[in-house]
Image (cartoon, rainbow, N blue to C red):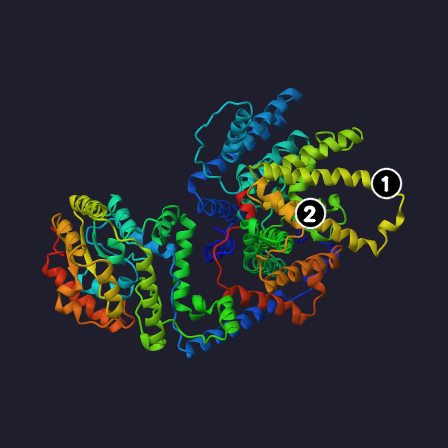
Amino acid sequence: MIFNSLTFFFFLGVVHLVYSLPLSWRVRKTHLWLSSYIFYAAWNPPFVLLLWISTCVDWVAGQRIHRARKKEHKRLFLVLSLLVNLGLLGYFKYGNFLLETFTVILAGIGINYQPPMSQLVLPVGISFYTFQSLSYSFDIYKGKLEPWSRFSDFAFFVTFFPQLVAGPIVRAADFLPQCTTSQRATATQMGWGLSLLVLGLFEKVILADAMLAPVADTVYGNVGSAGTMDAWVGVLAFSGQIFFDFSGYSLCAIGVAMTFGFVLPDNFRFPYAAIGFSDFWRRWHISLSTWLKDYLYIPLGGNRKGGLRTHVNLMITMLLGGLWHGASWTFVAWGGLHGIYLVLERLLRQWLGRMPFVTTAPMRPVLALTTFLMVAVTYVFFRAETFGDAFALLVLMFNGVDASLLALPQSMRVIFLVGTLFVIHYAMRNSSLEALAARLSPVWRWAVPAAALIVLCVYRGGERAFIYFQF
Amino acid sequence: MPLFTSSSSKRATEDLSLIDWRRLWGRILIVVMLIIGVWEAYWRLAGFTPGIADDWRIWGLLRRQANGSSETVALIGASRILLGLDPAILEERINAPVYMLAIDGSNPLPVLENLVEDEGFNGRIICSLTPYWLATDTSTRMDRSAGWLRSYRQQKLSSRVETRLSLVAQSHLVFRNAELAPTELWRQWRKGESINPPYAPLRPDRYRPADYSKIDLQALRRSRIERSRQMHAEAAVLERETFQERTATIASWVRALGERGGSVAFVRFPSCGAIREIERQTAPQKHFWQVFADKVEAVNASVIHFEEYPELSDFTCMDGSHLQHDDAVRFTRNLEKILGQKGFWAPEK
């Protein structure tokens, strides 16, 4: 069930109807929990079992880690949780990838081995709920959290449908306390939650799917017949598409949760206005980058063990972060490029620190634009099906080929849209959507959501799933 | 109460809570309903009626419903049966469920094979066969039916529910018509084309009642003849042996379905004028249809060629290839009678 579907709105209406009844908090909470299973089962009912396994394992692991007196015992239960969660993730998501890689390595040393590839279907959202559930065990192991007393609350935390399949990845410490008191959305939460839902849908359906995706698909699907201009437009189109797609999903998730009175963490903070790559990762997919920082980068030693080790830790974190996105070496390359950017930025910062003009006001938009364009280039590896396509597109971007795959108005539309996106992000880089909404004049406050709703009602598009569902 | 656990400042949250959200959203909903209402009324006044956009999801919904009862009648073929046989009329006359499983511009044989292979289906099939699909080598042609069958098999529960809800919306709201999608309107406006209601809108039961008074019939007829000529010119007529192999395969399907209580009627729907002539040249009746009929009748299939029945042959295909709605209703009644005379509706057949 995707947010941009009639089924979801029907489901949401029914869930809200029951939730609004004068029932006890426990009943209403259980209703949300069970409805979340229905939401997930709509894709593939048997995969609910995986959700249960993840939930039960981390529930038990959390209890045992807390109860264990010796450090080794605590570690044993943490390892158990890791093995089960990452084992399931590895089996379903990376099984074929590992097998293919193994086959290539064998072929490299002259052994022709052709194992049968399994026909496994990737359980939707497995990377998200695995990380969310794992964070609970990690936090108890690190002594940051005590095991929760009620299993149903914990299961509800893992399953809560708005964020179940594509985040934001919520921390138990942020969510579970909200289960202790009866939640009903205030008028502000309901109103603002609905506004975020409409904005998120508009970003996804109109901006990502209708305006940018066709251009990105055309360029990435026909690299051989594209010219340099097409390549740049395609890369920009995908940069815009992935932002609108994923930020649209996050806004919908946060908005829907808010209409039930639940607060979820923010996932994007105008990332295309980032100045530098560490700033980018503080603004892009915030719930994943903080997860990787807290549970991977810092345990590896973070920046506490000297310059070289910091750079190695950064690279490991970003390479694994890339792999988290998809079972392909192109995603690893995408993560690796970001790792290299972060390392270079650290080195550069030491050097540029002696040049104060770099941080002056006129330089900031230049640095932001440079960061954006460099991030856009990394998406070539994220979007391309193969390394061959990715390198062909990169070469095309810089060698001045005069072919034209896209019509000029199509290219201009993408440049205008992505350019506007950059300008808005830059203008809003130190602000928030809430601040913007609070500043809007009363007419704009109702006219903008009304216009977005009208466009969404009359627009007819295909059922394009959110890009991050595949992760 | 914070709105996000991060990023939002306390000040912004406080400012948002000063807004009268009930009034704001009340106003938004009124404006949206008003504008959508005006939009809907405008297109209704322009002669548009609610119409369904055909796709594999809707087809898949009906395909699933076709299973389970020996009373069921599945209609398969391409546009000729989609425009030429009204399932509602047939359903009323035979008092049994009828499902339109024809796919516009496609080969009916993959769908026939799918129904035969599916043990859950044991009903009756009316298959519209044209000389093109019967007698030419279509193996290199991209065929929609194969794609639809593949997608339907993988359809998720949520997609099925979505299709049902979407059908409800499309059956009641004109502005949900595919022709009135903003991108389509923009395209037509840029080309300077007038925006007219479709002459053969799809009904929820997937029948397409055609009203040729709504279009430039001469232009349509010319394009149909041209397309037909091109299709037949590009397709190689089957060698005798290959044709006999195909016929034998179809006969084996009929036999297999018959063994579990189902039956098949092959119907050659009317075509007229130049298109009929093109078909006659490609696949002379004596060498193809007759050979095919002899073979499948031997395994208890019913075979009906419109030219062999006066009550099916006195129709004018307005565009050379398809019936208009009034004629389709009459054709349906006449075909039902003929099939009845052949014992097709009898339970033991």
Left or right placement of residue A314 versus residue B152 in this view? right
Looking at the rendered structure, the secondary structure element under dot 2 is: helix
- What's the residue at 52%, 74% (across, down)? B34
Q: Are marks 2 and 1 on the same chain?
A: yes
Question: At 33% from the left edge and 78% from the top edge, which residue is drawn?
Answer: B213
A27 lies left or right of A292: left
Across and down, in percent, residue B316 comes to 23, 73
Which residue does the image show at 71% across and 60% down from the upper left? Answer: A424
The amino acid type found where label 1 is placed reads: Trp
Mark number displayed over residue A453: none
Label 2 environment density (alpha carbons within 10 Å; few <14, some 14–19, many ≥20): many
User: Mark 2 highlights which residue?
Assistant: A375
Q: Position of residue A57 (x, y in %)?
A: 53, 31
- At which x and y percent is residue B235? 31, 55
The answer for how far apart the CA atoms under marks 2 and 1 are is 22 Å
Looking at the rendered structure, the kind of residue marked 2 is Val
Marks 2 and 1 close (CB-CB < 8 Å): no
Q: Which mark is residue A351?
A: 1
Question: Is A353 positioned to the left or the right of A183 in the image?
Answer: right
Where is A125 relative to A250, above or below?
above
B167 displayed left or right of A447 = left
Q: Secondary structure at mark 1?
A: helix
When asked about the image quadrant of residue B162, the answer is: bottom left
Q: Nearer the viewer, residue B49 or B80?
A: B80
